[in-house]
Image (spheres, rainbow, N blue to C red):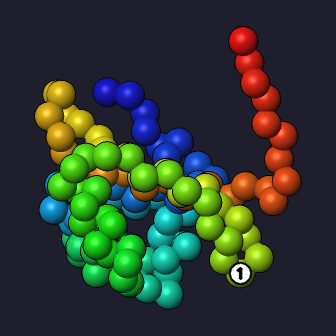
Amino acid sequence: MQDQQWINEFPGAIIVCDTEGIILSMNDKAIKTFESDGGENLIGTNVLDCHPEPSKTTFKELLRTQKKNIYTIEKNGVKKLIYQAPWYRNGEYAGFVELSLEIPFEMPHFVRR
């Protein structure tokens, strides 16, 4: 078995849910980020209950269609990249992973060939 402890100290928030939206796992950054909403106690609850409209409807549709959703947000002076994508177990759809990464307001963009 591979060591997956790196996930807890990864500097971005990682949340994993099942196909119904039940939160299965949160790394330390996600627990700290959502501390005022319950932190670790959110594990076992539905991620849909954590989203207001129209985000709730959007995420419900993602769970159904298994499509990625990638965007940036700014909140409290911090810009973040949000990357929501399906995950699979033995090739079978198992739910969604949300990565939330703090990014600079200005950042280089490279075109590689």
SS for dot 1:
loop
Q: Is residue 78 above or below residue 98?
A: below
Q: How many marks?
A: 1
Across and down, in percent, residue 17 comes to 27, 58
- Would residue 70 appear left or right of 105 to someone viewing this image? left
Tell which residue pokes out farthest to the top in this image. 113
Residue 96, visible in the rendered structure: yes
The residue under the point 19% across, 34% down is 89
Q: Which residue is mark 1?
A: 76
Across and down, in percent, residue 35 comes to 50, 81
Quarter assignment of residue 20: bottom left
Across and down, in percent, residue 64 comes to 18, 55
- Would residue 101 appear left or right of 77 to someone viewing this image? left
- The front one of 112 and 7 is 112
Across and down, in percent, residue 10 comes to 58, 49
Tell which residue pokes out farthest to the bottom in this image. 36
Quarter assignment of residue 71: bottom right
Residue 23, visible in the rendered structure: no
The residue under the point 17% across, 28% down is 90
Q: Is residue 23 above or below residue 62?
A: below
Q: Amino acid at mark 1?
A: Asn
The residue under the point 77% across, 76% down is 77
